[in-house]
Image (spheres, rainbow, N blue to C red):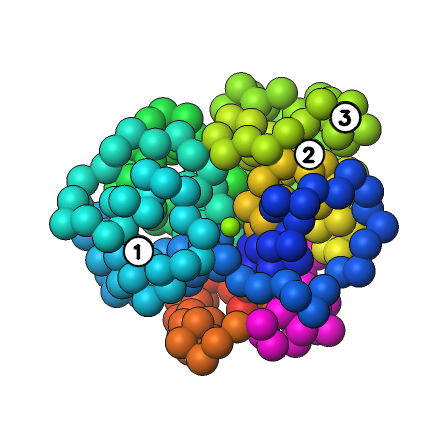
């Protein structure tokens, strides 16, 4: 989930001032965390509190009210500060920007042993979306993001075998597996290149016009930093796009130590505290082993 937070922080200064290039200082001094970070932490807390529907509602309202100026979308902001605890049919990209923790409670070892995907994380991903974003596109955006994260943990983590041989030393194959699965399962068109998307891409807050672009930014990347740069270079809803890309890229490459340390310097104590508890939590679940990089480090 730190990958989402990095993308949010790096992208924070470009949401309203898009740049269409990969050449920019990675962490600007005036960067800040926004709603993407706050809600990702809220989803992590909801899972730690039991992961029931109203755990998500409670955690989102708690953290949303702790950080009232984090930049929420209009309808989500209204929902946060109201007494309404029911969903409102959103297909905004908020469901995808916050979903990362759900994909880290899934056990790669279980999947390797049984050939079945562990259901707990996907159920949490669906719930984390449904409590507000219950429109089919809102759920789809969250599920596709969570699945891409899990697949990267699995494939890049060395669990996926081709003729008995792990494919983790073949990033192109790992990415092909993600592209093939997401296109088939969710119907997103992932065939366009960043150079094809970039010129016509404008600010867009929907899942269906953010998540495919975010996945493509990962597919074209060479490492974690490059993935974030790809996402920012598209323009659009930069912090959210980069948060989604970052969450997927983290599961493939891990987050370099210097980026992790720098990102922490933008967070305040309550959010850092959630991250500390989360790290202990997923270590205790044993879903993260030496094979899988990123989230627990
Ligand atoms: Mg934001």
Cβ atoms under marks 2 and 3 closer than 8 Å:
no
* 251 left or right of 43 in image: right
Label 3 residue near ligand 1, CB within 8 Å: no
| Residue identified by numbered label 2 | 216
Density class for disc 3 (Cα within 10 Å; few <14, some 14-19, many ≥20) is: few
The reply to whether residue 155 is in sight is no
In this view, the mark in front (2 or 1)? 1
Q: Is residue 248 magenta?
A: yes
Q: CA distance from mark 2 to mark 1?
A: 28 Å
Density class for disc 2 (Cα within 10 Å; few <14, some 14-19, many ≥20) is: many
Seen from the viewer's position, the closer of residues 180 and 227 is: 227
Q: CA distance from mark 2 to mark 3?
A: 15 Å
In this view, the mark in front (2 or 3)? 3
**Percent position of residue 211, x then y:** 56, 34
Q: Is residue 288 above or below residue 113?
A: below
**Percent position of residue 182, x then y:** 57, 29
Question: What range is drawn magenta here?
Answer: 247-266
| Residue identified by numbered label 3 | 199
In this view, the mark in front (1 or 3)? 3
Label 2 residue near ligand 1, CB within 8 Å: no
Mark 1 / mark 3, whichever is N-terminal = 1
The reply to whether residue 14 is in sight is yes
* 249 left or right of 210 in image: right
**Which SS does the magenta portion mostly show?**
helix
Q: Report the number of numbered marks.
A: 3
Q: CA distance from mark 1 to mark 3?
A: 35 Å
The quarter holding residue 21 reads: top right
């Amino acid at each position: 989930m730190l990958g989402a937070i990095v993308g949010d922080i790096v992208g924070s200064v470009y949401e309203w001032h898009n740049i269409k290039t990969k050449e920019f200082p990675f962490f600007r001094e005036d960067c800040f965390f926004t709603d993407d970070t706050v809600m990702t932490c809220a989803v992590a807390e909801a899972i730690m509190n039991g992961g029931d529907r109203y755990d998500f509602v409670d955690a989102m309202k708690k953290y949303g009210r702790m950080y009232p100026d984090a930049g929420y979308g209009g309808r989500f902001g209204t929902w946060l500060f109201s007494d309404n605890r029911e969903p409102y049919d959103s297909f905004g990209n908020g469901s995808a920007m916050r979903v990362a923790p759900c994909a880290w409670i899934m056990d790669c070892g279980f999947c390797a042993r049984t050939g079945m995907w562990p259901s707990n994380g996907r159920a949490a991903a669906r719930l984390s979306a449904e409590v507000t974003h219950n429109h089919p596109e809102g759920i789809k955006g969250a599920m596709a993001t969570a699945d891409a994260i899990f697949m990267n943990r699995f494939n890049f983590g060395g669990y996926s075998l081709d003729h008995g041989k792990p494919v983790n030393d073949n990033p192109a194959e790992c990415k092909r597996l993600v592209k093939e699965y997401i296109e088939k399962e969710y119907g997103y068109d992932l065939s366009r290149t960043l150079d094809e998307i970039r010129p016509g891409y404008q600010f867009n807050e929907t899942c269906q016009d953010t998540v495919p672009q975010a996945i493509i930014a990962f597919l074209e990347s060479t490492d974690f930093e490059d993935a974030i740069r790809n996402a920012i270079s598209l323009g659009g809803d930069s912090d959210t796009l980069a948060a989604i890309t970052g969450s997927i890229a983290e599961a493939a490459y891990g987050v370099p130590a210097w980026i992790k340390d720098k990102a922490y310097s933008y967070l305040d104590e309550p959010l850092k505290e959630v991250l500390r508890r989360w790290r202990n939590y997923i270590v205790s679940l044993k879903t993260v082993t030496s094979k899988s990089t990123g989230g627990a480090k």
